[in-house]
Image (tube, rainbow, N blue to C red):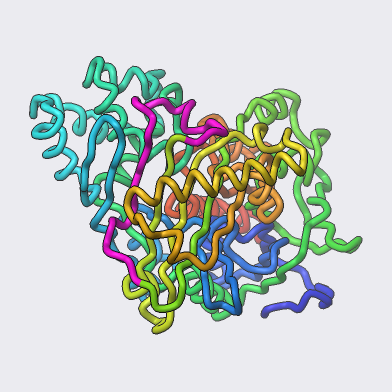
Amino acid sequence: MLFKTQDKITKDYDVIIIGSGLAGMTAANILGRNGHQVLLLESHNKLGGFATWFYRQNREHVFDVSLHGFPAGMIKTCRKYWNKDIADRIVQLKDVRFVNPQFKVQTDFTKEHYSNVLTTQFGIAPEAVTAFFEYLATMNFFDNSQMSNRELFEKFFPGRNDVTRILMEPITYANGSTLDDPAISYGIVFSNFMSKGVFTFKGGTDLIISKMKDELLKNNVDIKLQTRVDKIVVEDGKTTGIILENTKINAKAILSNANIRTTILNLVGEEHFPADYIEKTKAVRLNSSSCQVYMGLKKGVTIPHIGDLIFTSNYPTYDPARLLDLKVSSRTFSVYYPQEARPQEPDARVAIVSSTNCNYEDWKKLSPEEYEIEKNLMIEETLKGLEAFLPDIRDQLEIVEAATPLTVEKYTLHPKGSSFGTKFEGLEVSMNLHKTLPGLFHAGSVGIIMSGWLGAANYGVIQSNAIESYLGTQNV
């Protein structure tokens, strides 16, 4: 059932899910399909969390906010936990480009092509390349190695910042990873993301979320949008429901798809947890934020194929800190060619989205006047960067808008506008939540590994299994 905003919820549930990011939605679908009474609550006016979109000019223009690419594993996840129709619309992006002062590379983003590029264009010995990929294949989450990404690349490609750049820069863009993060985070992301290529959903984010909503309703999941939970209720040492609009709604289990710190410190409260667990929670670092510039072309205008994803930079070397700088030197262009991205819409426009990583604090400290100036400067620098590929682009544009971490914070409620969840330590806190407070589970973008479309969806799968086990104990 899809509740209206004014509807009051009066029934009890097996599971209440707070937040409809891909983790929350996937868990809801699995639990609903398995016969549980599930309520999915979302503060925004649409499902999807950061997997979202927006329209302009009476839907003449549509912009995907985060549909820039995900691993091949998304096909299997969608087929198994959603439906075949969704899975069959996931297609590979075969033209990924790097353009920077150190090199120019065009690739299909597969391990085979990367190996070829490293040996032929970068001059790396084949045995070193093979050893590197074999080492990544052996890494797993339970590996206690303290090696950092910096140490990983220095081990196999000493002194080669250019090699580090082609291998690391896409992951930095994708989820904010740095050279100081644990190497295990890179190893797992690489094996999921870069080994078989980059994929996208043919039809756009609005189509996939619409199909997911239909599937949720088909599986008897109750959904209410524009609804913000006030509190998670704890009684006798376990969760028993939520407070919504001054009314308690009972549930045997709660799954929060909100930020892990928000869940524990705000929705529940420190008093319900051991001191050492609260200490770990407060030590969880949020990952980086992002800015985007959305560009919509005039009706009927076409452009030559310049690539699907273009990692471009004018900075001389790979430097993660510079990727976050307010004075942007690096950005990713995602190009949405209508016939490929939205074949179901005969009059779809060309859309181009530029993404850059950034620091929330740099934008938060600005006055309103300074904020507008910086946004306009970001747009101008983005257009200059795009002119290197499309010299006449300014004359072809009808819509140009920008978003900052403050925009992300407003619509997703993520603290500091964090686009990529938390750093590595967030995953341990998240996974141990239900062990610390029975009945309360968490799924979302945590620990880098569970960030992005595939990571979030799979974390929803993992936590739905844990909830199933817990519900079994409550029904005895």
- The quadrant where residue 464 appears: bottom right
- The quadrant where residue 10 appears: bottom right
Q: Is residue 62 visible?
A: yes
**Quadrant where the image shows the N terminus:** bottom right
Q: Where is residue 305 in the image (x, y as percent from the top left)?
A: 27, 62
Residue at horizontal 75%, vertical 66%?
A: 226
In front: 138, or 324? Answer: 324
**Is residue 315 inside the magenta stretch?**
yes
Residue at horizontal 69%, vertical 68%?
A: 45
262 lies left or right of 271: left
Q: Position of residue 268 (x, y in %)?
A: 78, 44
Is 263 above or below relative to 53?
Answer: above
328 lies left or right of 58: left
Q: Is residue 437 visible?
A: no
Is 142 above or below relative to 409?
Answer: above
Is 185 above or below relative to 251?
Answer: above
Number of marks present in the image shown:
0
Residue at horizontal 71%, vertical 58%?
A: 252
In front: 194, or 278? Answer: 194
Residue at horizontal 63%, vertical 52%?
A: 257
Q: Where is residue 404 in the image (x, y as percent from the top left)?
A: 62, 46
* Stretch in magenta: 302-328
In front: 58, or 376? Answer: 376
124 lies left or right of 324: left
Q: Which residue lies furthest to the right in this view?
A: 246
In front: 171, or 374? Answer: 374
**Is residue 29 inside the magenta stretch?**
no
Is 474 above or below relative to 384?
Answer: below
Q: Position of residue 147 (x, y in %)?
A: 37, 19
> What kind of secondary structure does the magenta stretch mostly adopt?
loop
